[in-house]
Image (cartoon, grey):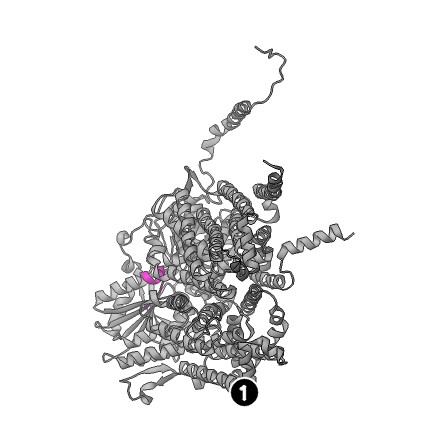
Amino acid sequence: MSKVNTDFYKKDIKPIAIFSIVLLTLPFWFEYIGGYKGLDTKIVIWIIFAIGFDLLLGYMGFLSFGHAAFFGTSAYATGLMLLHFSDNIIPAMLVGIASAIAMAFIIGFLTLKRTGIYFSILTLAFGEMLHSMVLSTLQNWTGGDNGLTGLQSPMLMGMKMDGELMYYFTVIIAIVAYYVARRIIRSPFGLMLVAIKSNQVRLEYTGVNVARYKLMGFVISAVYAGLAGSLMVVYEPYVASEFLSWHLSGHVVIMTVLGGVGTLVGPMVGVGFMLYFENVLSVYMGEQWMLVLGLIFMLTVIFLPGGFMQLFGKMKSIFTGGK
Amino acid sequence: MTDIKNEKKIWTRRDVLKTGGGVAAAAATPMFFMKDAWAEEAIGNYPVKGPTVKFGFNVPQTGAYADEGSDQLRGFKLAVEHLNNGGGMLETLKPSSLKGNGVLGKKVEYVTGDTQTNPDAARTSARRMIDRDGVIMWSGGSSSATAIAQQYLAQEKGVIYMDALTHSNDTTGKDKRRYGFRYFFNAHMTGKALAPVISKAYGKDRRAFHLTADYTWGHTQFNSMRDFTEAEGWTTVQNIMTPLKSTDFSAFLTAVLNSDADVLVLNHYGKNMVNSLTQAVQFGMRELQKNGKTMEIVVPLYSRLMAQGAGIDNVEGVYGTTSWSWKQQDAGSQAFTKAFEAANGFPPSQAAHVGYCQALLYANACEMAGTFYPPAVIKALEDFKFSGTGTGDSFYRGEDHQAMRDILVVQGNSKAKSTGKYDLLNIHQTVKAADVTYPVNTFKGELGPYKPA
Amino acid sequence: MVNSIFLQFLTGMQLGAIYVMISLGLALIFGTLGVVNFAHGAMFMLAAYFGVIISESLGWGAAIFLVPAIMFAIGLAMERGLIRYFYTRPHTDQILVTFGLAIVVQELLKWQFGANNLPFATPDWGTGITRLHDYLPFLEGFVAYPKWRLIVTAVSLITVAALFALLQFTTFGLVVRAGMRDPEMLRLLGVNITQRFSIVFAIGVMIAGIAGVFGGPVTQVDPAIGMVFLVPSFLVVVIGGMGSLPGTVLASFIIGLAISFTATIPALANIIIYVIAIGILLFRPRGLMGQKGVME
């Protein structure tokens, strides 16, 4: 390998190494900060979801309020596979992700033609439509309001997927997902995404088939959402209709923006922050945790659009540069 | 050939594995001999360490059934109070092994959660109580969807769940689970008890339009009501499934007005019922004359809280069924009602009653079994016959974990006769357990194993 | 038969009546200011809460006047204090901050009043049944309709008419309409756009306020209704054509009627609004009455 290439790859090694170490050791120190078993797996699943969402929002510049559509579609597909086909998670997850991709092509085709605002509203509408369909129109297959119950315990090669095994399985997938995301950003394709964000029209004039890149970017972020959705069903063998609701879509938006849009690492911090708030701090704060989080979110959007990452950057420069 | 005498021993991987294996085997050997001493392995959050034992109460604090949730929580709190200090139904429950000093010598503590009347939130909250708070059992809920979701979780995790307010046939029907027990009655029992009463009151050639909450409970209640009313000679004109989140029923009520039905059956509960009944009255349905008869409204599953929400003018004369009423005069009911009123200043609803009783029944089963070990507690509850809890001679059927007990047919009171704002439902008839019992094979489903799966 | 269709039509109109008032505010704000107000549903909800409190303490008459006035003031404050700073920021930021505001309002109401609904009683003069068969001879037999729903429908029609009158016949309205077409030009002509923008925003919120106080008794008042009404309102604006007020009015009533006439097939009724929106998207992206080229 030439020197240029190794330098290029070196850029990725450090962040990925830190990411891996933090996640791999999490179960050991998590309880000291109030976490509990089970919550750690949930956090990693959401991190995968948020990474994909950040690719769409932070790099391509499109704010989707309906990403639950892909999370939920994959979850239902995975659940149905576990319910009717076999308890092996590999085919179930593959079908889940494939269904998210299919849904992304359909929704993307219809919504990406419009500008940012229209796009956001339409994605919200599609999410809600799927939510409604799962509750009434398709309830014979989806279990309606009950959700999909009675799923067999998910198995991988004869081992039951729960507890520590599930956690480490998820972490490995997350590390790969993060690595892939970093490679995407620094590839020519990633450059296209950023170009779309900065000025779509101008890009079109240079002869680039913008529509195709937009769709690809959208589908890729849906893959992450679908992966997270199917992992969620493996972690908790139950599919809730809530998986398609705007609440879920709203959560990933909040997490990503709070953490820092366009940084990949920021959303992870956002995930940890929000889930920590919801599950740990809520004991002390009671039911007002969402109010506090909402206020923090608003303040972040107004004063600190770069989220926590911007805050860390500022603090870092105070400590290092301000001598 | 190399001279290996002086070579330093390098630990190869194979060496590590061999040594490790030997060490592990040596360490495990004592366990093999001691294994028989540990006849009860850890299941769920058993064994319970320390001087206290934790119960979890997962109630709807938001959503369509939230009013029932807060009352249920009051019932639970009272149960913990009585379990730790005696009083209330501890004195009337027969047979009782409860001593009033906690359970198996441990003081009872509790944690609470919010089901949001939503199965996913209920499951998440329950899981938190199991994983984070270490509860040995949990109870609570006002919707069958949440109950069913939680029963599946109970079976997976090996932690017993005592169903609270759930009326769907599925809970002890196709979704029955070994780790769940239901004391509340079900839609089948409602249909069986109510249909004869309303056909006697309104006549045998009525045409019924059903508005049904679109989820498991609504579906099963519609099925049961339809089957039993049609057996009495009624015709079912139409059924519309209304989304659980609906608040405005005008479009559906318009459809009712446009049909030739002369009875409106509201398979709704909680806020759904408060809204649909109020709006039905606003649409003039109680004054309407159809087919030469006055239009009537039936609310198969009632609760005093719902009646309060709808207002006495709207519920007057409307028939339905409930599990229990504070107006009951038997010793168990009175003991509970008096204690509840003393603690809260107003009488309890059926939501509070079922929560209270379930907590007591579980604790009693632990005392009878002499342990918290879930399979033993489950066996103690199965086929347990008891009385003194306000539901007559009751019995937890082992084949489906459904309690066979008395239920009440009630009718909305009139303003003139009511003694106060809690006196909204008159007991029309107490239907004995024997009259609402049904064969086990009426519903499909299997309980599952005693060990978590 | 006539009865049946008439009743379904009436129900459709009253369902559309509430949508129209919320959506108009949204369309007005978006058409003139280009701001996507994700907190608009929360404004409707807030007004409903004010309606409950004021009608119980000071009476309904006071509520009818005070609530829109309060919402107008809130709208002004919101525009001057928050929205104004986002005109130059990317659109996504606007959506995010108003979304955040919606959540904060929702949680504040939940904290203050609990998550359960507040009973919102209609005033005595509005309670009860209107015996329509007394007024409309073509109806057969006994046909009754809740009085309040008829009042809501009437109020919404009056509000729509008043708004159009304002826009069509006043100088202020002229400036606003011009601003909707070409804000740059207005600025170049020396018109003080900023002040007018505040007022437009406040009017939009005020109309949602009228929807809240009159519609509250019908839709129920709890912390979730803000978001429940937000999505359909946006879709109505999209279907009508973003930037077209007549389109929004038309779309509202079309949606109301669609829901009413499909009520007996719930599987369809629940998704009919999405089906229509997608249909419009595919075959007429500018909406029913939108201008060509806007938002394409």
Q: Residue at x 62, y 58 (%)?
A: A306
Quadrant of the drawing holding the N terminus of chain A: top right
Q: Which residue is mark 1?
A: C170
Left/right of residue B412 with respect to residue A66 in the rendered view: left
Circle 1 chain: C
On whether residue C110 falls in the magenta region, the answer is no
Would you say residue B217 sits in the magenta stretch? yes
Across and down, in percent, residue B55 comes to 49, 52
Residue A27 falls in image quadrant: top right
How far from the left and from the top, in percent, is residue A289? 57, 60
Quarter of image, res B203: bottom left
Image quadrant where residue C75 sits: bottom right
Q: Is residue C104 visible?
A: yes
Question: Can residue B394 be seen at all in this image of the molecule?
Answer: no
How packed is label 1: few (under 14 Cα within 10 Å), some, or many (20 or more)? Answer: few
Taking depth in this image into account, of B322 and A314 the one nearest to the observer is: A314
Relative to A131, does residue B22 appear above or below in the rendering? above
**Which residue lies at the image location 59% right of the left edge and 11% below the top edge?**
B2
Give the magenta range. B211-219
